[in-house]
């Protein structure tokens, strides 16, 4: 296994660990916050999770770029594509939903965020399995 592939595997594992924690623990807890306490809870969540997202997604970008530069095999392409899918869901669904939820509690937007989050978790799982192959 090349160094680039090891980096991709390590970051894919970190990403799935992070994403699984968000999906199983963080978002369900956030979803239970009463509407009257929503604004403060959402701000605290955003402040706490943003640095972690930057580190995890930044390392994924570096590892995927390195894997691409190193001449990927089919499994690596799948890992990169699945990672890209998770990032796309973040950029086009989760981040905008968070932006809107920052303006106030909205049960429907929160449900959409939770659905998008499950897609990210699935994509992260696919990426890790492919990186293991």
Image (spheres, rainbow, N blue to C red):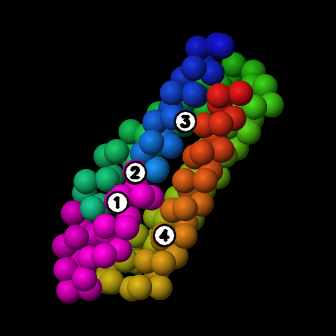
The residue closer to the viewer here, 50 or 124, is 124
In percent of the image, x 31 and y 67: which residue is there? 29
Residue 19 locus on image (x, y percent): 46, 50
Q: Which residue is drawn at 20% across and 86% down?
A: 36
What is the crowding at mark 4: few (fewer than 14 residues within 10 Å), some, or many (at least 20)? some
Q: What stretch is highlighted in magenta?
A: 21-44
The disc placed on residue 21 is: 2
N-term-proximal mark, 4 vs 2? 2
User: Which comes before the other along the chain, label 2 or label 3?
Assistant: 3
Query: Of helix, strand and loop, which one carries label 3?
Result: helix
Which one is closest to the eye, mark 2 or mark 3?
2
Give the residue pinned by disc 4: 114
Answer with mark 1 or mark 3, whichever residue precedes in sequence.
3
From the image, give the main secondary structure of the stretch colored magenta: helix
Q: Quadrant of residue 67?
A: top right
Does 37 sit left or right of 97 as displayed?
A: left
Q: Residue at x 63, y 21 (%)?
A: 5
């Amino acid at each position: 296994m090349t160094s680039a592939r090891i980096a991709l595997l390590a970051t894919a594992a970190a990403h799935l660990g992070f994403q699984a924690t968000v999906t199983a623990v963080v978002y369900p807890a956030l979803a239970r916050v009463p509407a009257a306490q929503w604004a403060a809870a959402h701000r605290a969540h955003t402040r706490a999770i943003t640095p972690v997202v930057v580190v995890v997604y930044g390392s994924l970008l570096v590892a995927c770029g390195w894997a691409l530069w190193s001449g990927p095999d089919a499994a690596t392409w799948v890992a990169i594509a699945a990672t890209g899918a998770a990032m796309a869901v973040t950029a086009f669904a989760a981040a905008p939903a968070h932006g809107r939820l920052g303006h106030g509690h909205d049960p429907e937007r929160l449900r959409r965020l939770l659905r998008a989050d499950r897609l990210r978790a699935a994509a992260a799982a696919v990426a890790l399995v492919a990186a293991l192959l």
